[in-house]
Image: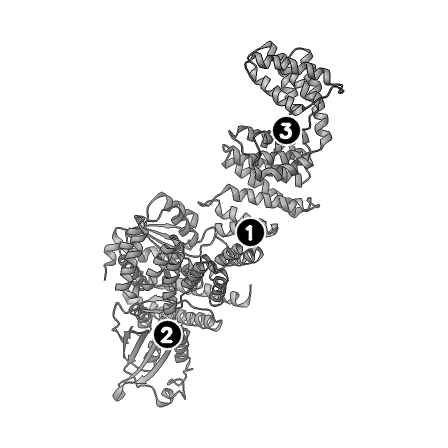
Amino acid sequence: MLSLDQILKNKRILILDDLVEARSSMKKMMTLLGASSIDTASSGREASQMINERHYDIILSDYNLDKGKDGQQVLEEARYTNRLKSSSLFIMVTGENAMDMVMGALEYEPDNYITKPYTLSMLRDRMQRIFLIKNELSEIDAAMDAGNLNRAIELAHALLAEKPKLIMPLTRILGKLYLRKKDYVSAQAVYTVLVEQRSVAWARLGQAICMHFLDDSRAALALIDQCLLQHPLYVQCYDWKATILLSTGKPLEAQKSLEKAVEISPKAVLRQMELGRVAFDNGDFKTAEQAFEQAVRLGRYSCYKNTSTYLKFAQTVRNILAGRSDTNNKELRLLADKSFRVFDELREDYADQHDIMFDTCILESKTHLALNDEEKAKASTSLAASYLEKIKTPDSERELSLAENYLETGQHVKAQGIINKVKQKGLDKKLTARIEEIENNISRSQVRDHNASLNAQGIDHYSKKDYLKAIILFDEAAADQNASTSVLMNAIQAKISQFELNKSAISGLKDCHVYFKRIGFIGEADDRYERYTRLKESFHKHWKAAGLS
Amino acid sequence: MNFAELVGTVVHDLKNQLQSLLDYEHEALSQIPSQYHVHIFPILQRTLRLKNDTMKMVSLFRMEQKQNLISDDAWPLDTANGAIEVTQIQFPNLNIENHIAADSQGFYNDNLVMLALVTLITNSAQAGSTKIVLTAQDQDGLMLKIEDNGHGFPESILKGEKATTKAEGSGLGLHFVRLIAEHHQQGNKKGHIELGNLTQNAGAFVCLYLP
């Protein structure tokens, strides 16, 4: 046997339990067993911080913690952020009631577990066993740390042949490695060997996952259901069931499965996010809202904090509000307030990220609008526009969002302006339908009135020989695809006049070329024929003189 | 919340309270001069007994609910040591020998099997045994054997006609151990127990087979 006090002497240990008696009792026992440097934490949040700040060789964590994260989340975050070396040990301390969940994790499983209640000598025996196994697996761990998966697999098979009693830990490792390599045939083979000898729930789930990836989703679902009959609290089964159901086009059933998973184990951020996404797509905004709210709350002090969760929450709330006429009702006001608090939090944390601020303002505007507060909605939209200007290369999707918001707040001209800009960039096929929809909703008369006013102002500046200002106004009016021939000719005339004043304004001439194309053919009978011919002649003269052809 | 969950919550708290009671008693023992231990010891013995009863109740409840109590790699030496630790406090004069090899390994629910061993040791002690020997074999499943130097089982029990040797005994002890054994199933193999007497009236034995 290994000498436990020799092993523990130099190990840095973290004990996590929300109950003070349990914490001090574990600390005392570990000290009696030879440990000398022990830290303690009373909440998942505190533990995660400590794990981020320093390396621990052994973490002993209670599974059920009162508030916030559970031990499982602390473990997942520590692995996700690579704060655990494979030589480290994460040991879950758990009652019998959580065993299904603790042992069932295939991806983020603890290195080992200790069941409560335990005495000093039981803890000693258990720690001895844990180190013995860890010791046996050390070469494999090293290969995994070095990123050499094939070597790790080879070593694991060799060790299994030599020591068949290690079949449980080795199957776990082999299954995980094969899954990581997407070698589902081999993964299924190792799980099956184990299942044939022993009824092990996680190996069954492993088999089911392989079946799914090997395109037999029906068999996979049947196996998972069978497993759930025996282990109704095996939460990871519900997660995988949802994944498989989604992939087979059954989103409503997938949502049911995720709801069950969340009911059993509500503290996992990623699971709440997934439920939110699926429910949102299913149009079940009530469920989505609750899930996203939990995801925001649970993720706030975790590595999974994510602005898209915040925005998805706000979007869901907005969708709920938009479907209701009684938005003054207290419950809905409270709901809206939650959204506004989310916006405030985003402003506090991401003030310098213009894209996030833009998305925030857009949703804020929509929320105001859902509450029938058009003034505030307009203000938020203007704010969104100012953030969009600060983004160096704004994407068309965001520009169209702004156009939609302009439309929603009755600012048709501005909406048209954005559409014109997006169209000038060249059309992305994916956006065609969206653009069309926006344009269909833009009020022609509003835009026409606005362009008429631009044209009138342009004429005014032209007559004062302020061609540059005139050009800006005429160009803006001409940006409308339905701009009249007179507006286009005004623009041409202003550009030619400016060229005559300053021969370096060649780009203006090129614009004229485009405008003539848009005007097309004008026959002699047309009232505008004379003006058209005159402009065309001057244009050709300057065009040749400038050496263009 | 349904009935089962409600019971679960209450029992969970009961277990926690008993555990911290035990912790306080151990703490007291370590702080108080040894001549006074005699006053604490009966309290400790009864607390342990209460805890065992609670654990039994929880296990029976879970098995009754058809909940699958998970099995995993387990080491009979450790399981037996745990059972001995508990029973030795109850029966300080009982001589328990653990002859199980350190590398002997099984696949079972550690808590359940420990409770089974505690029950069997307690039965022997209450039936007047002064010495108990524990052994194990781990070829083709696991066999745990507990031998005592008591009076042995009467014919009626061995034939299955009666369940207890104790005047006030309920016979639940052996029944509980049998339930635990049968809870362990691998494929079509099911756990079971075997009772017998050693030759020349030298005592009784119980074998616990776990597939």
Which chain does the residue under circle 1 lie in?
A: A
Q: Secondary structure at mark 2?
A: helix
Q: Position of residue A482 (x, y in %)?
A: 69, 28
Label 1 – label 3 distance at C-alpha: 35 Å
- Depicted A454 relative to depicted A44: above or below: above
| First reached walking from the N terminus: tag 1 or tag 3 | 1
Q: Position of residue B31 (x, y in %)?
A: 31, 60
Which of discs 2 and 1 lies nearer the camera? The answer is: 1
Q: Nearer the viewer, residue A36 or A403?
A: A403
Label 2: which residue? B116
Category of crowding for the residue at label 2, using alpha-carbon neighbours closer than 10 angstroms: few (below 14), some (14–19), many (at least 20):
many
Left or right, residue A413 beside residue B15: right
Which of discs 3 and 2 lies nearer the camera? The answer is: 3
Quadrant of residue A161 within the rendered picture: bottom left
The residue under label 1 is which amino acid type? Val
Q: Secondary structure at mark 3?
A: helix
Q: Nearer the viewer, residue B75 or A46?
A: B75
Q: Image quadrant for the C terminus of chain A?
A: top right
- Depicted A470 relative to depicted A37: above or below: above
Label 1: which residue? A278
Label 3: which residue? A417
Which of discs 1 and 3 lies nearer the camera? The answer is: 3
For the point 52% across and 46% down, the residue is A296
Residue at the far front in the pictured view: A524
The residue under label 3 is which amino acid type? Gly
Which chain does the residue under circle 3 lie in?
A: A
The number of numbered badges drawn on the structure is 3
Left or right, residue A374 beside residue A426: right
Which chain does the residue under circle 2 lie in?
A: B
Q: Position of residue A372 (x, y in %)?
A: 69, 39
